Image (cartoon, coloured by chain):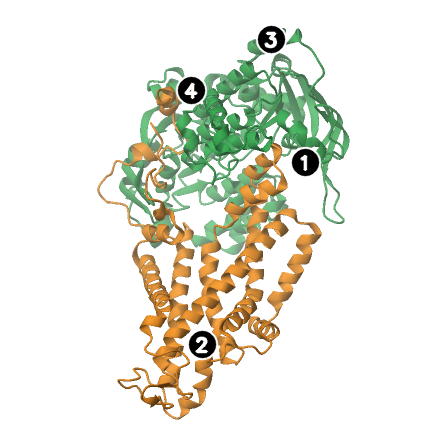
Chain colours: A green, B orange
Amino acid sequence: MSDVVEIRELEVTFATDGGDVVAVDKVSLSVTAGEVLAIVGESGSGKTVTAKAILGLLPETAVTRGAIVLNGTDIVGLTGARLRAIRGVDVAMVFQEPSLALNPVYTVGWQIAEGLRAHGTSTRREARARAIDMLGRVGIPEPEKRVDYYPHQFSGGQKQRVVIAMALVLDPELIVADEPTTALDVTVQAEILDLLRRCRDEFGTAIILITHNMGIVADLADRVAVMYQGTIVEDGAAVDLFARAQHPYTQKLLAAVPRLGAGAARAVARAKERSATSSAPVVSAHDLRIEYPGRIGVKPFVAVDGVSFTISPGEVLGLVGESGSGKTTIGRAIGGLTRITGGSLEVFGHEMLGVKERSFRPARNQIGFVFQDPASSFNPLLTIAECVAEPLIVHGRAADPRAARPRVNDLLEAVQLPRAYGDRFPHELSGGQRQRASLARSLALEPSLLIADEPTSALDVSVQARVLELFAELQKEFGFAALFISHDLAVVDMLADRIAVMYQGKLVEEGTGAQVLGNPRDPYTQRLLASLPVPDPAEQAVRRERLRSLREADHP
Amino acid sequence: MVTSIPTVAPRGTTWWRKLPVVHQLRQSVGLQRGMLVTGLVITGFFIVVALFAAVIAPYGFNELRNAEGLFGSQQPPSAQHLLGTTAGGYDVLSRVIWGTQTAFEVIIVALLLSFFVGVFLGLVSGYIGGWLDRVLIVIADAVYAFPSLLLAIVAAIVISGGQSSLWGGVFAAAISITAVFIPQYFRVIRAETIRIKAEPYVESAKVIGASNGRIMFRHVLRNATRTLPLIVTLNSSEAILTLAGLGFLGFGIEPTSAAEWGYDLNKSVSDVTSGIWWTSVFPGLAIVLVVLGVTLVGESLNDLADPRLRTRRKADVAPSTTAESSVVPDGSLDEVAHIDELET
């Protein structure tokens, strides 16, 4: 088959405050019609820049060299009207965040027809008919009615379907999808991946899929290109790559992906150790209810509804759920950041219902907190050492950062950061290093309970593996109890003794890793488990079928 | 690999390179650099003139005569009086030079007063919120609603009460300007505080049990002050205009206590129709130039502070090798593998 796009020796250089940065270095790729090429890489590997170069979307500070031949036209150096004529018709884009890619003040029908208007090919009536047709084909129910809806009337997954409809409306030969499911929940992700597969099969569209998730690659891609520091280190058929990765970086990347079922054996061993020392739980919740007050005349939003659980000393409870399930709210309530509105939540013997900040403050030195985004959880104007020393100073264990320094050095060593990093500022550290510093800060007071709110979701997969390993080591060494909150079942499985699954504010299932993952009873847990793509094309195909049958069982 | 993120000045660079204006000057290129340099040169020139007014000015600001007798009023420019004399018989050049000093005195006093009060109120109001915040916002809005010059006039009358000493006049002008400026600092700092209050690093200070005072002054305040250099420069030019406006309307400083451009402009109004140009042109020019200089500095600081507006040098066409060390913001496998070797 002929190549839809051929990239030869592409080089992209950005001018930044700190000098020129080569983001893409001599990349050569080609995609044939009806093929899905996945470009995989970690942040900063140049995969998004490569994708944007195909549409000529790079900012003015970028200099592009090489050739991108799209249907016989080299688009490097094209500007203005000639570039616009290619966009949409020959190549279209699906963006990462569907809520940002849609304009909130126009109806989705108008936005889908915008591409038709831009290329002046149809009348208003035709455009509307085409928009309705497209909405139906991407799986939006009642397209005749919903063509006049505004973006906020759709859910996240439906919005992404609309974005895909916008990309498909001019029947392009190539779609560039930049992390199309990263912003979506895992059950919705499976549906969008199905839709992209249908785009390829029904429309014959070639797809360049940019992703960092090996599971998605295994699910969808025909061919894979692995990017690292601006170059392609490996390029081959997906089946071969997963079975026999050649380049050491690819091997490491695949090994770093957390796999389901890896943690069960460890949890059993740990449970045996712990059963000898059973004592009062550090956290116990009974019928816990947390509401966020609405505006006048609007009912309060119930984030957590009738949840009961306990965390024993030294135990790791993994809390899993999709966005909006209330898992973060529970973590914040235990940390005293969110007030609870009903039921009972006891933390170290303090009842959190109507607790006063003053009376709870003494208990705070027993609680460590690790936040989701390591980039913003450090005061940007303090050095790492000053940030880590902060809890010691606040609780009077040290007079000033200088006096706390020996202890800070020990802590940095415990999280495997060089001591000298203490003198750096947060932005001078990489994401993984910052998250390790964040662990060091949370452990400064040797807490008996650590609350980790999605501590690795902002990190690359290889860095995530390292941080999770460190977390497990530290937990063994210090023996703290932990509430580990995550949307990723595989990550929770690696660390947790028990797993609790939340869905729409309710706790739907709780048990050991073996119980919840091996034999899930709740239909939601079953669906969640089946939606998680695994980095193995053959196994993923089997799982996909199981998910389909599950879904058909749900909606007969 | 030791990550060195390129935007950070390497350790050991001299401290003055990190100062607000110096840092931006080094960062700028092209037109933006031109604007900034022009502004800095004009402002610097007037600051030097203000500092050495006593040396530069040929006569005192309130001298009407020298050894040879009275200067005479409305004398055209000559060897004795390079820019002529005013209707009141003062030397125009000396008045303009001494006026620079008054202008900067007023700017400094006005900015100091409004800066500290405004920043403190904004911080407390934004962080604590509740009824205190609402009351302060209502007051700030009420002050906004008044025409600022009218407010300054009222304040000037209340404060000076007819006095006309140098510092009495300067303070009257400065405090009346302060009344207009406090709400601006208040608003900016309050908005920043409310934004920063929701940042995870403030929450992380909260969960370790830090007191409100500590969070406010150690974690919020320093992060909220980033836009202040910009507002300070823009407000300086506004302060000069307000002072000149007060002087022009007759609420400023008497000619016997200090030289003031607005007052001189006021007295030269009748000269304009009779062809005596030198009494009005030079004080007017001084006002325009100082405001232009300070505004240029402020505007270019504004552009440089915003990465989207900041222009950079074009990337070199020749391939460069910087990518190895700088393109991996989240670290890499190699880095993790070698981390133990970095242990010092």
Write down the residue under mark 1: A338
- Residue B114, x across and y down, in percent: 54, 60
Q: Chain of mark 3?
A: A
**Residues at circles 2 and 3 in contact by the CB criterion of under 8 Å:** no
Callout 1 amino acid: Thr
The disc label shown at residue A254, or none:
4
Q: CA distance from mark 1 to mark 2?
A: 58 Å
Q: Quadrant of the C terminus of chain A?
A: top right
Q: CA distance from mark 4 to mark 2?
A: 75 Å
Q: CA distance from mark 3 to mark 1?
A: 34 Å
Q: What residue appears at the point 69 percent right and 57 percent down from the top-left corner? A: B135
Q: CA distance from mark 2 to mark 3?
A: 85 Å
Q: Nearer the viewer, mark 4 or mark 3?
A: 3
Callout 4 amino acid: Leu
Callout 4 crowding tier (Cα within 10 Å): few <14, some 14–19, many ≥20: many
The disc label shown at residue A268, or none:
3
Q: CA distance from mark 4 to mark 3?
A: 26 Å
Q: Is residue A404 above or below residue B171?
A: above
**Residues at circles 3 and 1 in contact by the CB criterion of under 8 Å:** no
**Do the residues indicated by labels 2 and 3 lie within the same chain of the protein?**
no
Label located before the other in sequence (4 or 3): 4
Q: Nearer the viewer, residue A398 or B62?
A: B62
Q: Quadrant of the N terminus of chain A?
A: top left
Q: What residue appears at the point 40 percent right and 78 percent down from the top-left corner? A: B61
Q: Residue furthest left?
A: B318
Q: Nearer the viewer, mark 2 or mark 3?
A: 2
